[in-house]
Image (cartoon, rainbow, N blue to C red):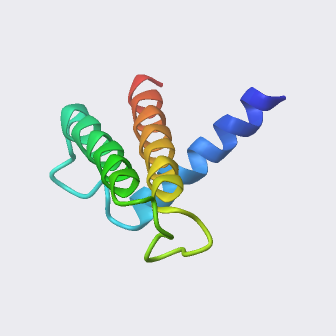
């Protein structure tokens, strides 16, 4: 059950990214997507180094929480794109 729900969310994340132009031409390489995911982790680290204040866009969450969510979102997007290419 978890896997099916996770895959549904993963597909939703990917379709949202497509809708917002994150997969426009030229299509980003997997390496570029991995680098962008790494940048989210770096932003989480910087937030923690600066006392982990509330995020500037979603202040009900800390900076690290928001950046970790971004990591998950980017990974879900990339994984769905890879699944789509294989299928």
Q: Residue placed farthest to the right in the image?
A: 1
Which sits in the foreground, 75 or 46?
46
Quadrant into which the N terminus falls: top right
- Vertically, is 40 above or below 53? above
Within the image, what quadrant is residue 17 found in? bottom left
Q: Position of residue 3 (x, y in %)?
A: 73, 27
Question: Residue 76 vs residue 6: left or right?
Answer: left
Which sits in the foreground, 53 or 32?
53
Q: Residue placed farthest to the left in the image?
A: 26
Q: Position of residue 83 (x, y in %)?
A: 47, 28
Residue, x 45% and y 32% (percent of image)?
79
Q: Position of residue 31 (x, y in %)?
A: 20, 32
Q: Position of residue 29 (x, y in %)?
A: 20, 37
- Vertically, is 20 above or below 56? above
Which sits in the foreground, 83 or 79?
79
- Vertically, is 6 above or below 47? above
Question: Residue 27 vs residue 62: left or right?
Answer: left
Residue, x 47% and y 53% (percent of image)?
64
Question: Residue 49 vs residue 74: left or right?
Answer: left
Q: Residue placed farthest to the top in the image?
A: 86
Residue, x 19% and y 40% (percent of image)?
32
């Amino acid at each position: 059950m978890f896997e099916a729900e996770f895959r549904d969310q993963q597909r939703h994340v990917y379709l949202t990214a497509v809708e917002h132009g994150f997969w426009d031409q030229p299509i980003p390489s997997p390496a570029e997507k991995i680098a962008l995911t790494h940048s989210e982790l770096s932003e989480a680290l910087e937030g923690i180094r600066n006392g982990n204040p509330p995020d500037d866009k979603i202040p009900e969450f800390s900076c690290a929480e928001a950046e970790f969510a971004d990591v998950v979102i980017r990974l879900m997007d990339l994984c769905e794109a890879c699944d789509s290419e294989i299928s």
